[in-house]
């Protein structure tokens, strides 16, 4: 190579060296010197934000079981305006989605629609097949197009893992905002947090890549409900309904020491996963919405109030007139003729005449009316469940001579099952009426406590002495009175039976053909931890007495459920 050629080669080599050094220098500046600046620009170009709805939080039992949870559900949508061959698209989609071609074609050809949801609740197999379709004609998105032809979206639907267990009280989330039912309605404002801004990623053409991730760490509610005890109550009430075929039935369990509701069961009931399959009556929580005349289960409250005022003692003799007593223009009857018996035996054997005399003659109208109000009858308990009924206690100004004998027997007054249970809890715990509650705690997504419920005393109704005397009387009801079928071996059970006549809507008179059977009691009598009420409306197939129909159910619940109460 001559000298001229070597010179040209050297110049070229020098130029390449300069260019290479310049490139290295530029790369160094970009990757090292201005790395943070360049990265920030890139993030701005490829990321953005969008707003997503916050998922409604879970509802849990006190023993950590999930009663309600929002789960992701995928759906497929199409943009009809981007699909030229609607007939071909319908033919391809039909077997994948399990739909008729005509049904899909109708949606694809609907005028003026930019996005149509074809099917919800997709299976994983359907999602996989659809994602494959998105890469094929006629669904493949061309490079020049700014919109997708078909896509898979995600929404969150409420699911209830335990089905109808606690169903009527729990209620359900409605697809129509503002129409939730049951406890879901009460908790909706607390569990549904405000919409949240989240990050999304875009490609070079500013199209969103994938779906935004929704933070599932949401507000949660913990109830006082114990799932194991709830299942016991559901099982025993279901068996009783199968045997006696009542029009409706309710069972409630409470902690008499705190007012916490441990279980509520209704019959009929429903599965919140399928609310449309149930008639409206099955969705009623009759424990709080359905007042009824309680009959003889009300007798202990009149007697306990008289005991507290020192107007009577448990051994006070009351003349039950051998089964027939006239008070004013009306004659009262007992099922069995009793002469003079103690107050304790009036309750033990459920004498109507004895209870009426305590109300009318011992207390009198004014104190009897005050007695009913003190136990909480005629006013809402304030429980955190929707649609609570206050029951019915007529004002004193509307009382007649009939009222002072009817009310002590549990007639001319209506109470809800929850009111009755809460009042019996007051006898069990020494005389204090507590506000019932079912929501123990609500915790926000950041861990802070939004709601923290606990025992809330409403008032002291009677003193400990009178309460203890009534507990002993009610224990006698189970030992050798009308409630013997509520007895549990090895457990001291106390309670009261009730068999109330219903009013015939045609004659407006009490009928001898339709009754409500009930029993409300607690255990252990010497250290009450569990108070249970069971009510069955119009039991069929034999006996209709509370002692024969409802008392055994309470005994079974105590026997199998007491182990779940601390």
Image (spheres, helix red, strand yellow):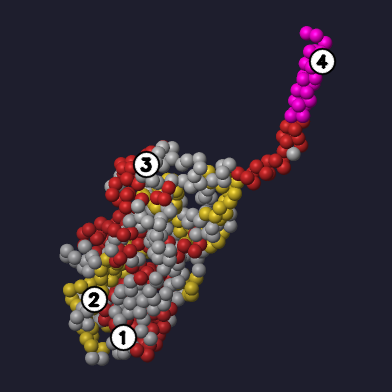
Q: Residues within 10 Å of mark 3 (few under 14, many from 20)?
A: some
Q: Total number of numbered labels?
A: 4
Q: What x and y, as percent, mark residue 83?
A: 40, 46
Verify CB contact (< 8 Å) between mark 4 and mark 3: no
Tag 3 or tag 1, which sits nearer the N-term? 3
Name the residue: 35% across, 52% down: 109
In this picture, residue 204 sits left or right of residue 281: right
Name the residue: 63% across, 45% down: 45
Task: Report the magenta residues as a range.
Answer: 1-24
How far is disc 2 from disc 4 in space, using C-alphas?
Answer: 121 Å
Q: Which residue is mark 4?
A: 7
Nearer to us: label 4 or label 3: 4
Q: For numbered disc 4, what is the local secondary structure?
A: helix
Q: Which residue is mark 1?
A: 403
Disc assigned to residue 126: 3
Give the prevailing secondary structure in the magenta stretch.
Answer: helix
In this picture, residue 224 sits left or right of residue 45: left
């Amino acid at each position: 190579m001559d000298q001229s050629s070597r010179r040209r080669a050297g110049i070229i080599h020098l130029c390449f060296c300069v260019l290479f050094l310049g490139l290295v220098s530029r790369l160094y500046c970009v990757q090292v010197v201005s790395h943070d600046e360049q990265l920030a620009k890139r993030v701005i170009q490829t990321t953005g934000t969008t707003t997503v709805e916050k998922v409604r939080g879970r509802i849990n039992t006190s023993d950590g079981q999930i009663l309600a949870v929002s789960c992701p559900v995928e759906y497929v949508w199409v943009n009809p305006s981007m699909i030229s061959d609607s007939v071909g698209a319908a033919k391809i989609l039909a077997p994948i989605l399990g739909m008729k071609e005509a049904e899909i074609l109708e949606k694809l050809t609907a005028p003026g629609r930019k996005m149509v949801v074809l099917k919800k609740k997709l299976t994983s197999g359907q999602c996989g097949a659809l994602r494959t379709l998105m890469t094929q004609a006629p669904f493949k998105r061309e490079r020049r197009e700014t919109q997708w032809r078909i896509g898979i979206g995600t929404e969150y639907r409420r699911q209830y893992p335990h089905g109808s267990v606690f169903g009527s009280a729990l209620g359900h989330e409605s697809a129509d905002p503002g129409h939730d039912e049951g406890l879901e309605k009460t908790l909706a404002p607390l569990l549904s947090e405000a919409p949240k801004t989240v990050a999304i990623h875009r490609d070079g053409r500013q199209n969103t890549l994938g779906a935004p991730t929704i933070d599932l760490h949401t507000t949660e509610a913990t109830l006082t409900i114990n799932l194991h005890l709830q299942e016991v109550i559901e099982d025993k009430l279901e068996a009783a309904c199968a045997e006696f075929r009542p029009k409706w039935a309710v069972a409630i369990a409470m902690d008499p020491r705190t007012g916490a509701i441990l279980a509520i069961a209704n019959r009929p009931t429903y599965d919140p996963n399928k609310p449309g399959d149930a008639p409206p009556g099955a969705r009623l929580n009759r424990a709080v919405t359905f007042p009824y005349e309680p009959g003889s289960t009300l007798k202990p409250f009149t007697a306990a109030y008289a005991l507290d005022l020192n107007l009577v003692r448990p051994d006070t003799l009351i003349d039950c007139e051998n089964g027939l007593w006239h008070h004013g223009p009306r004659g009262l009857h007992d099922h069995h003729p009793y002469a003079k018996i103690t107050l304790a035996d009036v309750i033990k054997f459920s004498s109507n005449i004895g209870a009426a005399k305590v109300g009318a003659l011992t207390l009198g109208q004014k104190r009897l009316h005050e007695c009913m109000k003190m136990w909480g009858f005629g006013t809402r308990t304030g429980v955190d469940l929707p649609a609570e009924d206050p029951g019915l206690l007529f004002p004193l100004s509307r009382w007649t001579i009939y009222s002072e004998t009817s009310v002590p027997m549990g007639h001319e007054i209506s109470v809800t099952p929850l009111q009755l249970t809460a009042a019996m809890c007051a006898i069990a715990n020494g005389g204090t009426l507590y506000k019932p509650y079912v929501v123990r705690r609500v915790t926000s997504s950041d861990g802070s406590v939004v709601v923290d419920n606990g025992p809330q005393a409403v008032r002291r109704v009677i003193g400990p002495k009178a309460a203890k005397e009534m507990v002993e009387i009610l224990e006698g009801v189970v030992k050798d009175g009308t409630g013997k079928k509520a007895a549990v071996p090895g457990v001291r059970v106390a309670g009261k039976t009730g068999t109330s006549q219903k009013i015939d809507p045609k004659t407006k008179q009490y009928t001898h053909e339709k009754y409500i059977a009930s029993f409300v009691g607690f255990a252990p009598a010497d250290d009450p931890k569990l108070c249970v009420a069971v009510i069955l409306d119009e039991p069929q197939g034999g006996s209709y007495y509370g002692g024969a129909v409802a008392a055994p159910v309470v005994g079974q619940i105590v026997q199998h459920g007491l182990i779940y109460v601390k």
